[in-house]
Amino acid sequence: MTQAPLASRPHDHSRCVSHALAEAESICARQGLRLTALRKRVLELVWASHKPLGAYDILGVLSEEDGRRAAPPTVYRALDFLLENGLVHRIASLNAFVGCSHPEHAHQGQFLICRGCHAAIELEQPLISQAIVNAASGVGFAVEGQTVEVVGLCAGCRTPS
């Protein structure tokens, strides 16, 4: 039996955030990448919830913390760095970002997005990725990247109060 994804079951969220940050530091150190204070803070904000977070939401928090208006290009550059290095995923349908649950290896993003609470649960199912590649190949299409977004209701939102 497969265990329920982390976002859909009770867990110590502060531990999950600190683990994600430590893992990002380790990955960046191994690859000789600079995880600046801003990049780390943006990653922390993305991980602060299992709900996708937009760039302007991040800007708002940074502006409140800093007392001055954060520059959008700065946040977008930090997000680009995090995306390029597999530390976050972009949820295209929401134009928002979520922390990557498996940054230690390259993989395609597959997400269950709850239309009730807006949680985004990352799956890692190689068979789904391979099925897409095989179907595309069958029609002469070369897949360069893929993100699968499935909308529905999580267990918490399906259960009546």
Image (tube, rainbow, N blue to C red):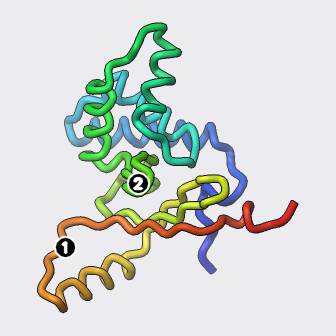
Label 2: state its secondary structure: strand
The outermost residue toward the right is 161
Q: Which residue corresponds to mark 2?
A: 91
Horizontal and vertical percent position of residue 150: 49, 69
Q: Residue drawn at (61%, 55%), measured in percent from left and top? A: 7
Real-space Cα separation, disc 2 to disc 1, in angstroms = 18 Å
Mark 2 residue type: Ile
Q: Secondary structure at mark 1?
A: loop
Q: Residues within 10 Å of mark 1 (few under 14, many from 20)?
A: few
Image location (x, y in percent) of residue 145: 24, 65
Q: Residue at x 54, y 61 (%)?
A: 113
Is 140 situated above or below 48?
below
Count residues near mark 2 (Cα–Cα under 10 Å), then give few for <14, some for 14-19, many for 20+. Answer: many
Say which quadrant the N terminus sits in. bottom right
Residue 128 figure quarter: bottom left
Residue 35 % position (x, y): 31, 30
Vertical order, 1 against 151 (above or below): below
**Which quarter of the image is occupied by the C terminus?**
bottom right
Q: Which residue is mark 1?
A: 143
Numbered label attached to residue 92 = none
Decide: is 102 above or below 132. Answer: above
Q: Are marks 2 and 1 in contact (CB under 8 Å)?
A: no
Earlier in the chain: of badge 2 and badge 1, it is 2
Total numbered badges shown on the rendered structure: 2
Q: Residue at x 16, y 89 (%)?
A: 139
